[in-house]
Image (spheres, grey):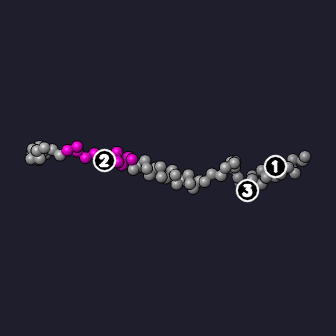
């Protein structure tokens, strides 16, 4: 069989002429879905970071508010 008449070689030549530089996989990859998923993961991570930075509320109010005010005054 002549190498030039081989359909596989002809296809590879066509890919090369078209500028294809990545091998085609058996399963299509949806790059848009991957981008959306990465953005959602980043958004969730940012939300977790913000919630971790907020101080939790006190367990209970001070028993003597007047003493707390006096202690806070300079």
Q: Is residue 21 left or right of residue 35?
A: right
| Residue 50 x, y percent position in the rendering | 36, 49
The answer to whether residue 74 of the structure is visible from this angle is: no
Q: Mark 2 touching mark 1, by CB under 8 A?
A: no
Task: Report, in whole angstroms, how far the alpha carbon at label 3 lies from the one at label 2.
Answer: 54 Å
> Which dot, 2 or 1, sits closer to the camera?
2
Q: CA distance from mark 2 to mark 1?
A: 62 Å
- Mark 2 secondary-structure assignment: loop
Residue beneath disc 1: 9
Determine the CA span between mark 1 and mark 3: 14 Å
Q: Which residues are magenta?
A: 48-60
Screen quadrant of the C terminus: top left
Residue extending furthest toward the right: 1
Kindly identify the residue that appears in the image at 51 percent across and 50 percent down: 38
Residue 9 in magenta? Answer: no
Question: Can you give x and y, in whole percent of width and height, for residue 2 in the image?
Answer: 90, 47
Residue placed at 25% from the left, 46% from the top?
57
For discs 1 and 3, the disc positioned in front in the rendered view: 1
Drawn side of residue 34 relative to residue 22, left or right: left
Which residue is pictured at 17% across the width and 46% down the height? Answer: 61
Can residue 59 be seen? yes
Under tag 3, what secondary structure?
Answer: helix
Q: Are marks 3 and 2 in contact (CB under 8 Å)?
A: no
Mark positioned earlier in the residue sequence (1 or 3): 1
- Give the labeled residue for mark 3: 18
Label 1: element kind: helix
Q: Residue 26: x, y in percent?
A: 69, 48
Q: Quick check: is 50 in the magenta stretch?
A: yes
Give the labeled residue for mark 2. 54
């Amino acid at each position: 069989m002549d190498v030039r008449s081989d359909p596989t070689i002809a296809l590879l030549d066509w890919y090369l002429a078209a500028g294809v530089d990545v091998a085609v996989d058996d399963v299509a990859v949806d790059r848009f879905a991957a981008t959306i998923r990465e953005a959602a993961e980043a958004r969730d991570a940012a939300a977790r970071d913000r919630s971790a930075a907020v101080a939790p509320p006190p367990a209970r109010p001070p028993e003597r508010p007047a003493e707390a005010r006096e202690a806070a005054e300079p």
